[in-house]
Image (spheres, rainbow, N blue to C red):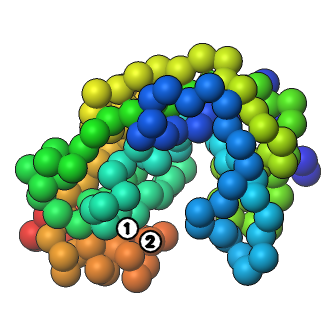
Amino acid sequence: MDMKKPEVMYHASSESDIAEFEPRNESPRYVGEENLVFATPYKEVAAMFLVPRSIPAEISKYGDSYVVFVNGTENEFRSLDKGGAIYKLPADSFETNRDVGMGDTEWVSRRTVKPISKTLYKLSTEALRENGVNIYFLKDDVFQRVKANPSNGLDIVKSSKTV
């Protein structure tokens, strides 16, 4: 069953003044992947990509719950949090392949895409909370257990005494 194509997509960036997104690929999902513009039909998922890349984090979706696990304290996170923007993009040039990357959650365009609009955030935590994403600050041992078994991340965190 094919997912109905969404009308709009979302893309998050720490840069808040992007006039158009050109295809590029800093983190290929497989060897030889072409340059693409990445986006998602879920604003919650886009918000998760505002988490500073300089702090280890895992993003997950459990049913209708969106979660970010951070390896560090809230203070460490806040010292690195620079916010950014969530851009709303037209969906016409995007396509998805449920067998690659994040499946129906991740869409790609081979063409340059101009944003329709954007929402600015001073902090990524603001974007996460506004979009209903839960954030957990974890000690290293708990984070490593979550990273090794992300599909059970919430259970690991809830059963851990040291969150």
Q: What residue is drawn where x is 46% and y is 47%?
A: 49
The single residue placed furthest to the top in the displayed view is 117
Query: What residue would you read off at disc 2?
Result: 150
Question: Is residue 155 visible to us here?
Answer: no
Q: Position of residue 97 (x, y in %)?
A: 83, 58
Query: What residue would you read off at disc 1?
Result: 153
Residue 111 is marked as none
- Horizontally, residue 56 falls left or right of residue 161, namely right
Q: CA distance from mark 1 to mark 2?
A: 5 Å
Q: What residue is drawn where x is 66% and y is 60%?
A: 25
Question: Is residue 23 visible to us here?
Answer: yes
Q: What residue is drawn where x is 41% and y is 22%?
A: 120
Q: Quadrant of residue 116?
A: top right
Q: Nearer the viewer, residue 27 or 130?
A: 27
Q: Position of residue 127 (x, y in %)?
A: 37, 31
Q: What residue is drawn where x is 50% and y is 53%?
A: 61
Instruction: Tell whether label 2 touches label 1 (CB within 8 Å).
Output: yes
Task: Say few, some or many: other residues with alpha carbon within 10 Å of mark 1 (under 14 / 14 to 19 / 20 or more).
Answer: many
Quadrant in which the C terminus is drawn: bottom left
**134 to 162, vertically: above or below:** above
- Horizontally, residue 120 falls left or right of residue 163, namely right
Question: What SS does tag 2 mark?
Answer: helix
Q: Amino acid at mark 1?
A: Gly
Q: Position of residue 129 (x, y in %)?
A: 32, 32
**151 to 44, vertically: above or below:** below
